[in-house]
Image (cartoon, rainbow, N blue to C red):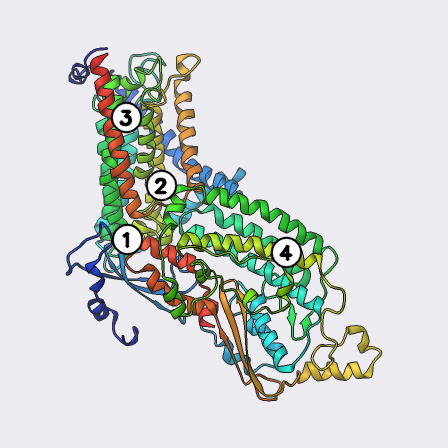
Amino acid sequence: MSSPLAAVSSAAEVSSPGPLWVQLVKAVVIFALVLQLAPTLVWLERRLLGRFQSRLGPNRVGPAGLLQPVADVIKLVSKESSTPTTAVPWMMAIAPVISIGTAVLTLAIIPFGAPGAYGGEFALAGIDVSIGILYFLAFGSLAFYGLLLGGWASGSKYSFLGSMRAAAQLVSYEVAIGLSLLGVAIAAGSLSLVDIVAAQDKVWFVVPQVVGFLIFLVAGFAEAARPPFDLPEADAELVAGYNTEFGGMRFGTFFLAEYLEIIVISAVAAAVFLGGWHGPGPEFLGPTWMFLKMAVLVLLFIWVRATVPRLRYDQLMSLGWKILLPLATLNVLVTATLVVLL
Amino acid sequence: MSSPLSVPYREREESVTLERLEAPLAGTEVEADAELLTINIGPHHPATHGVLRLLCTLEGEVVRDVVPLIGYVHTGIEKSCEDQQYWKAITFVERMDYLAYYFNAYAFCAAVERLLDEEVPPRAQYLRVIHMELNRIASHLFWLGTAALDLGAISMLWWSLRDRDMILDLFEMSGGQRLHTRYFQVGGVIEDIPPGFERKTRDFTANMRTRIGQYEALLDENQIFVERLHEVGIVPHERLKDLGVSGPLLRATGDSWDLRKAMPYCSYEHFDFRIPVGTVGDHYDRYRVRIAEMRESMRIVEQALDGLPEGPFITDNRKVALPPRHELATSMEALIYHFKLVTEGFRVPPGEVYEAIESPRGELGCFVVADGSSKPARVHMRDPSFINLQSLHDMAQDDLIADLIASIAMLDPILGGIDR
């Protein structure tokens, strides 16, 4: 294995994005396909929660309730977007856009198939950047600005408390998530997601990096503000947390952004730890494997929501700083030592 | 402190004492002039179990002061009872603590029976015990679901309501209604249990035992759930007694005070059951005590079904209880009694009585003053939710907001009972 430093410095060696028409097709496909996943996931979660909770879930609109998200969006769009008198209106308007924008932008770097799986030499990702993991971390952090600004700008005390919690959660879990990915980056010798997936052709990184995978999953739940880490919303405590004052499609945008965030976290975990497009069968089946692995992780998100209670604020902090961070640091140290020695 | 409502709350914000700051919660040390935030939790808030309003003074996430403000569902039930004949007032008192309607009805009926010096037939007493204990399970199930929901375990709500529905099916079978059945009458119960009730009840208790085991497996073996409750919201036993707190909250501290054992009523002395107690009186003990109480209640129900005596289900004193329907066609006397009871009601000799029973939330007392007419001169309920709510301040002060929500959940207040 070449030295990790050499691999990172040779950043220019990323696979070609392909000609302009290929880039356009990729953009449209990712947008059309993955953005449809968010409402589908909303439907799936509601149906599954219904099953978990011994009730039916939405089953009236369309076959098996599949059109329920469409009906919800139509309702939300037709609602008034009210703004409290104490709010900062323009910030309230841009906050949901930040949330959904960062989630969509992160999707651009997810590799869905091996380079050249459908002919040509380009990667089956929106863009293949040499700093893939940093890109993901950067936009993950930016996404919290949506929560922060939204909560702070609504001029409500509940929202304010929610955004304070979001800020604390971001600081606590960004570090752990970064360190958990660092182990993989060292082992693969690259920060590019395409290279990382390509490096897993023999063994998935979940095997050597199992600690990193678990830390990434736990921190990923926190990153997506999902139960048991849904403290920024905490419906029992803060009414709805940062989005208490948001109505209509502004709320809907936050809502969709949360589900896109789940998809992004699942996609990154599938690519970085679960071997991405690798699987039995010919290479063109790559995207299928990728989506299957994502689906498994997404189901885990839903399952956990139906099962566990919410952590308390101080417990969240001590889990992040006292358990995840030391573990992640240790994991990186051990990985780095092994890579240098072997 | 003057009434919290008489001073604008912005001013109150500055008058809140900070003396406890000398010993702040670990990890929350702040300067004494730290900014305080006053926040209204409720009356319309997802976690206040009705229309409870909490005026909270927060310092960051830490609750420094909490004042419960009540009265948002005050419906004047006690006053309305003074306008109703005794047998019509039962319908009113049932609507106070709307999750424990059999207990409300029993406390009132038993008080009136004591004033009338009326004997209740043994079968009626057993039927009352069966229904009250089923009601206790239903009430605790509702508490379990909402408390778990407040802690973020959303699925428990549907599961416990599913089981509560089976109890409501039983109530519908015996009394014709699911809520506010008005099954208890002065002198007995309104109707005997129908065929099939016993088998269905036994099916329920058998089923419920496995269900409780499943709930314990889900909650008790969840580290997050246990840590959220363990050693949180401890109020010393002495303080609870000073406040007059009773029921599971008191028993969680290790005090086995339960009126069913301490002052048996309604033939509770016939049954073999235990009083679950806790050790330190934290939220976890409160949770365990209520879960264990459900198991004991099922034992009582089964014993009552086993030993259900034959005989009348209501007193045959025609001056108090309506004559059977078939007698109206043949007996002139029955017709007269029926007419008198339905138009005027029965007269109760002058006197006053306080009847206390163990409701799911603690000591439920009913104080009735009779003036010799057919309407009570005064009806007052000592509702346990109202008294227990006083301990919220002690439970939640200097803890986090999340613990305040857990405290409300573990307090199990019913606003209909608090405001009456």
Circle 3 — which element? loop
Q: Amino acid at mark 1?
A: Ser
Circle 2 — which element? loop
Q: Amino acid at mark 4?
A: Asp
The residue pinned by badge 2 equals: A226
Q: Chain of mark 4?
A: B
Of marks 4 and 3, the one in the foreground: 4
The residue pinned by badge 4 equals: B169
Q: Amino acid at mark 2?
A: Arg
Residues under labels 2 and 4: Cα distance?
37 Å
Residue A233 location (% of width, % of height): 33, 48
- Is residue A55 among the parts visible in the rendering? no
Quarter of the image with the N terminus of chain B is: bottom left
Of marks 1 and 4, the one in the foreground: 4
Q: How packed is label 3: few (under 14 Cα within 10 Å), some, or many (20 or more)?
A: many
- At x 63%, y 68%, the residue is B266
The residue pinned by badge 3 equals: A109
Residues under labels 1 and 4: Cα distance?
42 Å
Judge from the rendering whether residue A3 lies leftward or rightward of residue B307; answer left or right.
left
The answer to which of A282 and B336 lies nearer the viewer is B336
Residue B375: quarter of image: bottom right
Residue A192 location (% of width, % of height): 24, 21
The answer to which of A254 and B83 lies nearer the viewer is B83
Earlier in the chain: of badge 2 and badge 1, it is 1
Q: How packed is label 4: few (under 14 Cα within 10 Å), some, or many (20 or more)?
A: some
The residue pinned by badge 1 equals: A159
Residues under labels 3 and 2: Cα distance?
23 Å
